[in-house]
Image (tube, grey):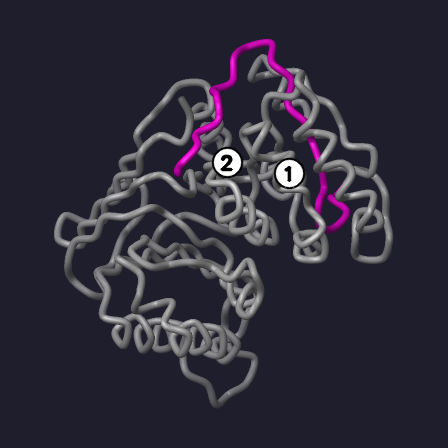
Amino acid sequence: MVIKPERLKKGDTVGIIAPASPPNKENLERGLKFFAELGLNYRLGKSLYNEYGYLAGSDEERLADLHEMFQDDEVKGIICAGGGYGTARIASAIDYKVISRNPKIFWGYSDITFLHTAIRQQTGIVTFHGPMIASDLGKADADPISKDQFKQLFQPTELLYTETTSELDEMVSGTAVGALVGGNLSLLSSTMGTKFEIDTAGKILLIEDINEEPRAVDRMLNQLFMAGKLQEAAGIIVGDFNNCVPERELSLTLDEVLGHYIKLAGRPALKGFKMGHCSPHIAIPFGTQAQLDTASKTLIVESGIY
C-alpha cells in the first residue's frame, strides 16, 4: 500500500536533522534562510550540530532526532541537512511503527538513500529524493532550479521530465511503468543481504553516485545484476555520476561500464537525468507511479503528496 504524506502549507514547521554526517555549518546556516522564503518555520534536531568523527552525533542521538521529528505533531515534514555516511547504522534500530503512525514528508538524498529504502519498504510511505540544505541550498552558487523543487511539497504536481531539462540518451529502447525507487548506487548495493535489501521487481530504478571510479561502479552494478535487481526492474533511469572518472591509466570509461550492465539487464533505460550530486538537482518522490518512454525521451512521475 502506497501512503502519500500530506502537503505543506505556509506557516507549517519542518524538522531539520542530520542522520548521517555533520553538515557544513556555514552552508547550513545559509540554507536555513531558504525556509523563511518558503513561508515555513523550522525546528532543529538536537544533534544537528554534533560531531562524532564522521557522524553527526552518536547513533542514539541521531536516531532520537529522527523519532522525535516523526512523533512531533507540529512538524509536518522532515528535511535532511546533508548526507555523508551513517544512516545504515541506525536503520535496524528505527521504530517503523512510529513512522507508520505519523506519515509525513521525508526529504534528502545520497546517504539518505538507505532511509528512503528502509522507510518505504517497511511502511509504504512515499519519500522524496531531492536537494538538501547544506549540500545544495546553502551553497553560494545554489541553483534556482534546485530551490524550485520544494514547490512540489505545497501542491500535488505531476513531474514531466523531458530534454528541456537535460539531454537524455536512450540506452535500451522501450516503455516502462512502475513505482519509482532507488537512489545512490553505493547505498543501494549496501542494502544487499540485509532486511532492507532494495526491491526492484516491476519498478523503475534510479541510480546515481559521486566520486566512484568506473571499476567501483562496475563492482556495484555487477552485484545488483548477479542478484537480479537490474533485470527485475521495469525500467532504469541513470542520474548524475559526478566525478566518476578513472584514477589509473588502464580503465574502462564510466559510459562503457554503465552501457555493459544496462544492456545486460535489457530493461528500457535512459541516462542523463539531473538527479543526484549535481546542479541543478531535480527532486522526485519515491514510491509513486512513473512512466518511462525512451522513444519520446520522457519520464512522468505522479505527485508524492495529497
Residue, disc 2: 143
- In this view, 40 is above or below 179: above
Which image quarter holds the N terminus? top left
Please name the residue shown 24% across and 42% down the image.
Answer: 162
Residue 29: where, in percent of width, then height? Answer: 74, 30
- Along the line of sight, the residue nearer the viewer: 212 or 299: 299
How many neighbours does mark 1 have within 10 angstroms: few (below 14), some (14-19), or many (20 or more)?
many
How many neighbours does mark 2 have within 10 angstroms: few (below 14), some (14-19), or many (20 or more)?
some
Residue 224: where, in percent of width, then height? Answer: 43, 72
Residue 233: name its quadrant: bottom left
Is residue 171 located in the magenta-colored stretch of the structure? no
Highlighted magenta segment, given as a residue range: 1-24
Residue 155: where, in percent of width, then height? Answer: 40, 18
| Lateral position of residue 215 relative to residue 140, left or right | left
- Along the line of sight, the residue nearer the viewer: 69 or 158: 69
- Along the line of sight, the residue nearer the viewer: 276 or 79: 79
